Image (cartoon, rainbow, N blue to C red):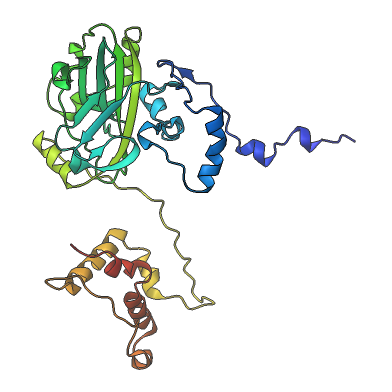
Amino acid sequence: MHVIDVDNHLLSLKERLAVPETERYDIGFKKSVLPISLQPSESKNVPKLSRKMHLTINLKKVEHWQLSIFHHYRIFDDIFHTNVFFHNTQNMQLKWGSTGLYQGNLIDAADTSNKPDIWIQSLNGGFSSFVLLNLDGNPYSCGGEIVHWLVANIPDGKSVGDGTEIVPYFQVVPFRGTGYHRIACLLLRHNEIINLTSRKPSSPALIDRIFNVGQLYKEFEKQWTPSSLSFAQASWDASVNEALHRIGMKSPIYEYQYYPPVKMDQKEFPLKPQPFNLYLDQFRNPKEIHADLLKKRLQMRKADKSPEQPKYPDIDYVEHKRYMPFWQHDNLIKENSGFSRYRVLWSNPIS
């Protein structure tokens, strides 16, 4: 008799859930480690001051950049398409007024309608180039990312206007129905001027702004080195349609295609009574059902405010229970209670 030892053939739950770590290569500058200014005598008092809530920390000197956030959102993987990473070794701030790019914060597309202000730390000699790109906005079959802004050869200590603008600025355009898009800004450091005139778009069309940033980095890999990276997340609003119309492009709308719903089996003599209205609704187009609810919302809306939900599900319960059909009375209670599909009547006010 042959006995199979399951311990030698099956994996434990911990082993199955463990994600194998991929080896990553640092392609940036070496990160400098700041020396600790505390004396040994002072470090002993830190726990005591912390317990008594007397410990003060200068937040301007605290490093907020976390590499794990960029790995979680696959920023390095989708920009360079390889298992690489780098540390932020040069300070950079990109802001539209009070809205900026940090580490995955949420921004509005309308805030990006104007060209942002960008500040780059001067390192005494050399040049900087940066690219502002959308990692999730390519609607075409060709590979690459949408480049919203590309400025090269910015001398140290100078403004962005002193550099060479390769791709003019264009606001963030996450299409409707596509969720949140990752908007990243990559800063590259180099000692010599790099010629990127071949990357200039031939027209303001969106398709001419699409190229592979990873291949661009690989082309000049020996000349420049990435030194800073930040990103934010943006979703659709009305300003996206206006921006697309200005360049002569229609504004697409994406919809998620769900799996077809499971339909109830039709039985000649069911054991339990089945509501015929729900049975018929499962064969209707969901868009028609949503359109009926929208018409009802518009009929109930007053000139100056949205409809108010009734205080009670059915104020005339006894009378309606006696004279109304069951399915009609059940729909009335669900509608006044905001249950199921009728929730949109009260929880989604019309502005």
Q: 222 and 267: which one is in front?
A: 222
Task: Determine whether 337 is above or below 153 in the image.
Answer: below
Image location (x, y in percent) of residue 93: 26, 29
The outermost residue toward the right is 1
Q: Does residue 4 lie above or below 196 as drawn? A: below
Residue at image coords 34%, 26%: 229
Q: Which residue is drawn at 35% across and 48% down?
A: 257
Residue 117 shown left or right of residue 65 in the figure: left
Question: Which of the 4 quarters of the picture holds residue 81?
Answer: top left
Residue appearing at x 17%, y 12% in the figure: 197
Q: Quadrant of residue 97?
A: top left
Left or right of residue 146: residue 261: right
Q: Is residue 132 visible?
A: yes
Tell me where residue 17 appears, x and y as whole percent.
61, 38
Front residue (pair 227, 169):
227
The x, y position of residue 82, in whole percent, is 43, 20
**Front-most of 296 and 45?**
45
